[in-house]
Amino acid sequence: MTNTGEHEEPARPGRRGVIKGFGLAAGGLAAGAAGGAAVVAGLPEEAPASAMAIPSAGPWRPARGHVDVTWSVDTAQKLVALTFDDGPMPKWTPMVHDVLDSEKVRATFFMVGERLLENARLVHGRMGRHEAGNHTWQHKDLSLLTHDQAYRQIHRAHAAIAQITGKEARHLRPPFGQLGGTTLSAAGQLGYDLTIWSIKMLEKTYEKNPPGLVDYIVNNTRPGMIVLAHDTGNPDRLVALKNLVPMIKGLRAKGFEFVTVSELIQAGARPEPPKRP
């Protein structure tokens, strides 16, 4: 995974350069389609095409032989990963970056490729300490898509993230947290792992009770958890963003350290057993 470092500011490509990158990369899509129709034809009659996790009738394996799905990690260290979905978008995304900068917190942004292309200026020079995650090109429900459709959604977002942020995303969060077999196969073909979450901001529940939301997050977060927030969406979500500082301070008072998703997963990795002589 490419790590540009906290203080690096990747060059900002023009829109034409990003689109050209998409065109060059699109040539690889045809390979993923081979044999797909034959496999789908073998599904039980009541099963949707998106249930199929094997995209080819012939021999097939994902890029790394497996796809991991992470909700949280097992660790005794007081680590928590703060994540933001659906951006970048005006007003909200800069607000989040301002808070994270002032509190010196690392986070993971699961970005929608189409929005990133439109709002590249919002993240230019602001992703140094943060991790870029893939939230698909158009925020479509991957559990309803064929393998090829899911592949395109992930692949186009991957290209935009790499071009605009200078970071190579390796964690995919499926929109709405929904996934089907084709989500797994498309992610696997592109070398992605999936990241869900273990606690989320309950904005609607606490819209009129901001201190209640702060208490909910601070009192229910455990070591190894992944927190879900959003940097765009319905106005009720602002109750979470406007109260990030007390949440951060409350968790730090309990000894928590904020890390990226990749750092959290690394901390939870089990050491290999020693080899026998």
Image (spheres, rainbow, N blue to C red):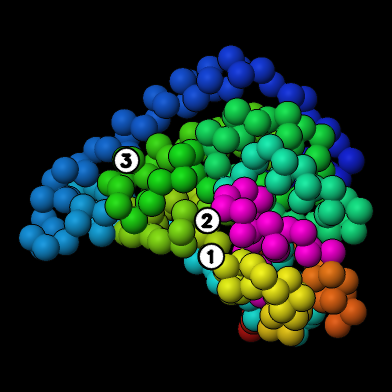
The answer to whether residue 70 is left or right of residue 165 is left
Q: Do the residues labelled 2 and 1 touch (CB within 8 Å)?
A: yes
Identify the residue at image location x=84%, y=54%: 99
| Callout in the foreground (1, 3) | 1
Which residue position holds label 2?
173
Secondary structure state at the residue bearing disc 1: loop
Question: How many numbered circles are shown?
Answer: 3
Crowding near the residue tagged with mark 1, few <14, some 14–19, many ≥20 C-alpha atoms within 10 Å: many
Mark closest to the chain's N terminus, 2 or 1? 2
Front-most of residues 137 and 64: 137
Residue 175, percent from left and from top: 47, 54
Quarter location, residue 244: bottom right
Whether residue 238 appears in magenta in the rendering, the answer is: yes
**Residue 133 position in % (x across, y down):** 61, 49
Quadrant of the image containing the C terminus: bottom right
The span shown in magenta is: 223-245
Q: Which residue is drawn at 41% across and 46% down?
A: 140
Residue 221 shows up from this direction: no
> Could you tell me which secondary element the residue under label 2 belongs to?
loop
Residue 27 is covered by the magenta coloring:
no
User: Identity of the amino acid at label 1?
Assistant: Ile
Q: Is residue 275 above or below residue 94?
A: below
Q: Distance between the residues labelled 1 and 3?
A: 22 Å
Label 3: which residue? 148
Along the horizontal axis of the image, is 52 left or right of 273?
left
At a point 72% along the width and 78% down the height, the residue shown is 212
Q: Quadrant of residue 82?
A: bottom right
Q: Visible in this render: residue 192?
A: yes
Q: Which amino acid does label 2 sit on?
A: Arg
Classed neighbour count for the residue bearing mark 2: other residues with Cα under 10 Å, few (<14), some (14–19), many (≥20): many
